[in-house]
Amino acid sequence: MNIGEAAEATGVSAKMIRHYESIGLIREAGRTGAGYRTYGPKDLSTLSFIRRARDLGFSIAQIRDLLALWQDRARASGDVKRIANQHVDEMKEKMRLLQEMVHTLEHLSAHCHGDDRPDCPILEQLASGKAEEACC
Amino acid sequence: MNIGEAAEATGVSAKMIRHYESIGLIREAGRTGAGYRTYGPKDLSTLSFIRRARDLGFSIAQIRDLLALWQDRARASGDVKRIANQHVDEMKEKMRLLQEMVHTLEHLSAHCHGDDRPDCPILEQLASGKAEEACC
DNA sequence: GCTTGACCTTGACATGATGGGAAGGTGCAC
DNA sequence: GTGCACCTTCCCATCATGTCAAGGTCAAGC
């Protein structure tokens, strides 16, 4: 199976398959006489695994660990759970920061006329850092 | 005022001040005879403006627009509000995606023993893409 | 005056995950 | 045997920021 077909089958772009190989996330693919990479069912499983983990937002480093655990029959599920929970915590923290920013900005936006007049609490906040006080 | 003092005063690192200058976000700083950059009160205001906008998650491109509006006395507050609301929408979309991932992962994690046994629905989901069905 | 240490200068390189493109080789169908 | 789709490697770009290196400058203490 060619890299293009493998990409099609797994949803990982050919570009990224080569990249994952270059950083050692996946083993080096076999080659045809002409140097074309070839992929078998096992490789496809690994690539699909990676794509699903990426879809869940895991970093490459985390995926590296998850792949090792996946291929380790003597693994402890606790190790997997720990990685997943850590990732969940990271995502929640990101959400919290986003929520804070959204909150501030929505508040400012609600007090902005949004018409042709130039006065705007959003710019005032950015300029002075104390629009909150000025406005509420 | 030196770049280091300006950085200290505004919370924008010296590195980033030079960077912002190089990409044309701020005007070129004045120089001493020895080539040191110098900053005045107006520059400090601009840098503080940028830092606050960055703290609210605005991209450099958006900040470029906001700065232009800030310095335009004939601006329409509607233009500012539009940029802010667009940014809020982007952040909300990011939060939505994060929430989805968190939801899936917390669900899987809840069904993982997290002990020394090897069986783990998290890995099963990543491997097969159908843990949801297998589990619930 | 000289040394020292803190600061400045430019420039290059790194991050993380991905995309884009160029230049050249290969495989297959007509 | 030609054309087209695909493959190869390699370089560059993103985005905002940090790090490091090599060298110049300033001010204070001796």
Image (cartoon, coloured by chain):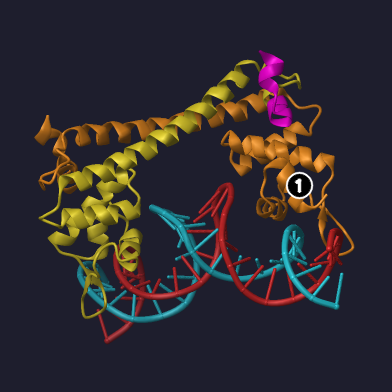
Chain colours: A orange, B yellow, C red, D cyan
Q: Main secondary structure of the magenta part?
A: helix
Residue segment shown in magenta: B123-136
Q: Is residue A119 magenta?
A: no
Quadrant of the rendered image containing residue C8: bottom left
Q: Is residue D1 above or below residue A15?
A: below
Q: Residue furthest right?
A: A33
- Check disc 1 and report its element: helix, strand or loop: helix
Image location (x, y in percent) of residue A39 = 82, 48
The quadrant of the image that shows the C terminus of chain A is top left
Residue at the image position 71 percent from the left and 22 percent from the top: B120
Label 1: chain letter: A
Q: Residue furthest top?
A: B136
Image location (x, y in percent) of residue A121 = 15, 40
Left-right relation of A56 to A135: right
Q: Is residue A133 above or below residue B17?
A: above
Residue at the image position 82 percent from the left and 39 percent from the top: A42
Is any atom of residue B114 visible in this view? no
| Other-residue count near label 1 (Cα within 10 Å), few / some / many at <14 / 14–19 / ≥20 | many
Residue at the image position 76 percent from the left and 47 percent from the top: A6
Image location (x, y in percent) of residue B131 = 69, 22
Q: Is residue B128 magenta?
A: yes
The residue tagged 1 is: A6
Quadrant of the rendered image containing residue A73: top right
Residue type at tag 1: Ala
